[in-house]
Image: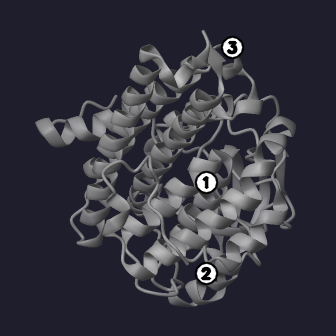
Amino acid sequence: MTFDILASDFYSYESLLSPQEQEALAAIRAYLETEVQPIVGDYWNRAEFPMQIVKPLAELNTFRFGWAETKPFENSAVFRGFVALELARIDASVATFVGVQNGLTTGAISVGGSQEQKDEWIPKLASGEVIGAFALTEPLSGSDSAQGLRTTATRDGDSWTINGSKRWIGNATFSDITVVWAKDTADGQVKGFIVPTTTPGYSATKIENKISLRSVQNADITLENVVVPESLRLQNANSFKDTAKVLRLTRAEVAWAAVGTAVGAYEAAVRYAGERVQFGKTIGSHQLIQDLLVKCLGNITASIGMVVRVSEMLDRGEQRDEHSALAKAYTTARMRETVAWARESLGGNGIVVDYDVARFFADAEAIYSYEGTREMNTLIVGRAITGKAAFV
């Protein structure tokens, strides 16, 4: 398969990928552009998820790229980042779905599960046979999840009883399993549980009326005396530090998705600039539009350089929490600027989904906030700089 580097990858960072990785990325790009891009606007408008894309994404190994137990070849973190960028470049909701399936759910089991749990669940998640969700955020606990988690788990012999509620849980309206994080009433430590969504007492209700990531099926989850066996407790997740290990890995890929969202808006703006005629010529011929597009490309290029580097550090085992936190804080801020400039370049047409930019503009707001707000990531980096924690 021919591999053409995106024009928006202005410094050709994709050339760092191995030939095998380039081929795999080209296959994903071809499918997304031909089969997903034409339909996502309609699904976004209807606030529905296109379930028909799950099987093809699985066949492209999109759910296998994150973890050693399932990857079909030795791929780099830089490659996995480019997959996240490519997904978000087409649709941030699709990128979020894959991030929950492959990053958060599979990641939680990979980091916190026993070998038996990995053997049972990771192949099913990788093939798309099982859809997963990751339930950490609560109605009254978001940024303070480390201390403020209210969902509880109480052990009784060989089983656990879970009570509480969760909010903003992606994939949760149709997931087969949900990794639920709860505080052990015995020792006060946060532990993880693989909860089949058919378990009595478990219910998920779709959150309606969103203006961002409308295709993502976020849910409020209620857990009322949900009983799960000890065999479904993540055996190697014994405190919030283990939860944080998962978030450190996925936070870097959210930074990549932020870049992809910026790229999607920028590319839509470039297309529009070549088609829209004002004052007798296409608007791409006007200096002010070129200035907006150059500012967009500058943000994208700087952000790609940052996320490539942080992923290289992950490959070498050098990435720390503050590295992924800075990447997430910086790229989402630049994304927010970029989608606004892209929207501005379309004038009034920038607020309708028909031209794609409005969708990226709206979706950027959710990516800016989830998996750690800019402020929380800033405090993580600030602690690394000064040696002093400024958390309240």
| Relative side of 104 to 55, left or right | left
Badge 2 or badge 1: first in the primary sequence: 1
Using the numbered discs, state the Cα–Cα distance from disc 2 to disc 1 in whole angstroms: 19 Å
Q: Is residue 254 visible?
A: yes
Q: Secondary structure at mark 3?
A: helix
Q: Which mark is residue 122?
A: 2
Q: Position of residue 150 (x, y in %)?
A: 59, 44
- Residue found at x 41% / y 64%: 242
Q: Which residue is mark 3?
A: 348
Q: Which mark is residue 392?
A: none
Q: Is residue 133 visible?
A: no
- Residue found at x 46% / y 57%: 250
- Residue found at x 62% / y 46%: 92
| Relative side of 9 to 60, left or right | left
Is disc 2 in contact with disc 1, using a CB cutoff of under 8 Å?
Answer: no
The residue positioned farthest toward the front in the image shown: 280
Q: Residues within 10 Å of mark 1 (few under 14, many from 20)?
A: many
Who is closer to the viewer here, 384 or 78?
78
Q: Position of residue 128 (x, y in %)?
A: 73, 75
Q: Which residue is mark 1?
A: 95
Using the numbered discs, state the Cα–Cα distance from disc 3 to disc 2 in whole angstroms: 46 Å
- Residue found at x 40% / y 51%: 9
Give the answer, above or below, for where 225 lies relative to 340.
Answer: below
- Going by the numbered disc 3, the residue's amino acid type is Gly
